[in-house]
Amino acid sequence: MRFIITRTAMAIPTLLIVAVTVFILIRMVPGDPAALMLGDNADAESVARLQARLGLDQPLPVQFAVWFRHLLTGDLGQSITTGQEVLPLVWKRFLVSAQIVVVAVFLACLIAVPAGAIAAWRQNGRLDVSLVSLATLLMSIPTFWLGLLLLLFLGLKQQWLPVVGYVSIADDPWRGILYLVMPILTMFLHELGVLLRMARASTLEVKNLEYISHARAKGLAESTVLWRHAFKNSFGPTWTLIGLVLGNLLGGIAVVETVFTIPGIGRLLVDAIFGRDYPVIQGCMLMIAAIYVVVNLVVDLCYPLFDPRVAVE
Amino acid sequence: MRLPFQINAMVGGAIIGFLLLVALCGAFWTPYDPLGISFSDKLTPPGPSHWLGTDEFGRDVASRLMAGAATSVWVSITTVTLAISVGVVIGVTSGYARGWFDRIVMAFNDALLAFPGILLALGLLAVLGANKYGIIVALGIAYSPSVARIVRGTVLSIREREFIAASRVTGNSEIYTMCRHVLPNCIAPLTVLATSMFGWVLLAESSLSFLGLGVPPPAPTWGNMLASARPFIAQAVWLAVLPGLCISITLLGINLLGDALRDRLDPRMRGRT
């Protein structure tokens, strides 16, 4: 229980500094934030009104306090280009990206984690060298190129899957899934490489420890030693990496969404940067960074399930 | 059986050596003008006159790949240098000063690490503007926190050692001690990090260029060549395949070289990655 409280409390300053960083970043943009937020067609009166509402005539710490109070109530302003409320917009787009990232990472874990453990168990053997080479190769292919190749072969040449676009699973489950297959496959193949290498490295960490020799000396079968004894202890570091991978994918998903024209949070952020839509940029950055912190918090909170020593320490 | 890791170093080194050679050549000479438009030659498949074909404006793809290599390598090397310089200054100062200064600096540093690198770079690009220099500064700042963390760790671990005390006792200034005795101990972990970072930056630069937030066209980069190839991939496969192949082979070379270096410089990790 103490572990849960301490670890959760540690996430709060991080979230606070994330908020400060995003605040400073948007304030670094040359020009008056209120004028920027209202766009080029705004008249002087509405700029003055927004300035007063955001406290822009006050000193910087007060401005931050006002901004932070709005943030806590979920008021992230409105998009300059579309006039939509930022929070519902960002949340809707985030859910689209999340279904791609979560499914891809889940599938990659299912295959990469056991494959990595087996590779480590047969270190330097033919299977290990093949698996590591395959993983290194997959890691070296950028997702946007892999996506383009899949699009070219599975979509345009073979016509097995719809090429670009997005249909919500809620509207039409079958077509929705078909549109998601290629983006998920792209991310899955990339993450397969990263996770396999990590799972292999952490299995190697425990492979030569004394308790493994002890388990073998007891006469246990190799497979029991690997899965019952080594795997349990080597899963911890991989589990931590899964949290980092999820966050990184959310940050880097914009390219995959661009290839397949998917209206996710990454594409929203890039379009907002093009349109200088600062409230949306701010909303996307806060959302992705907050999800990243929260996912890593959840990952850490689950860690004692695999390694009870962490909670005791 | 240690053979695969020697092969790693050889293959990785050969790929990176070849890349640097092509980039250096591409900066001064290319078979055709990489920006030279020729509508009569547009979308010509690879053949004797244009070895790797031409693009939608009839520009020679091989020349554009060479010029793109020069840009990508230049951007990556400058960015890595910037990230390492900023990270080393922050890490060394913080680790040497300790106390409240260290705590505040590291709190901010860790919060920056809480952003996925590419996200922070995207945010900074919104402020700095999407161009070559914007990318260098944005990625340089985005990747410096990891350098600062490693350098600070190394500084903290050796600052209490006898040879540092000895340097102070002989009357050397703090700055001299730092540069002459503390920094050289950071070189091994920094070399490993810089190699991996070269790969991350090259990938990030290509991704940003692909999104249209990098080096603006018509100047070629591998990323923006892929982006502009997108509408033509069905009729001109080479446009979609070649720039991506260049990025992948380069990243493969960097990953292999990184593994070999880690193997050599960090005995704890020997054979584990």
Image: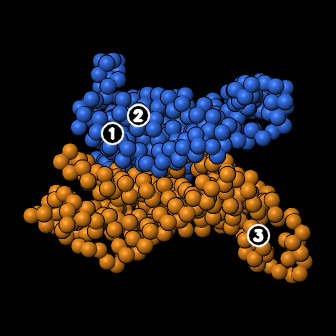
Chain colours: A blue, B orange
State which quarter of the image contains the N terminus of chain A.
top right
Earlier residue among tags 1 and 2 = 1
Query: Which residue is denoted by mark 1 in the rendering?
Result: A150
Residue A73 position in % (x across, y down): 51, 30
Query: Which residue is denoted by mark 2 in the rendering?
Result: A185
Give how far apart the Cα atoms at labels 3 and 1 are.
49 Å
CB atoms of marks 1 and 2 within 8 Å: yes
Which element type, helix, strand or loop, lies under badge 2? Answer: helix
Q: Residues within 10 Å of mark 2 (few under 14, many from 20)?
A: some
Q: Residues within 10 Å of mark 1 (few under 14, many from 20)?
A: some
Q: Amino acid at mark 1?
A: Leu
Residue B177 position in % (x across, y down): 79, 75
Q: Chain of mark 2?
A: A
Residue at 68% in and 37% down: A121
Query: Which residue is denoted by mark 3 in the rendering?
Result: B182
Residue at 69% in and 64% down: B188
Q: Is residue B106 left or right of residue B241?
A: right
Q: Is residue A169 left or right of residue B137?
A: left
Residue at 66% in and 43% down: A123
Give how far apart the Cα atoms at labels 1 and 2 are.
9 Å
Above or below, B54 relative to A297: below
Q: Amino acid at mark 2?
A: Leu
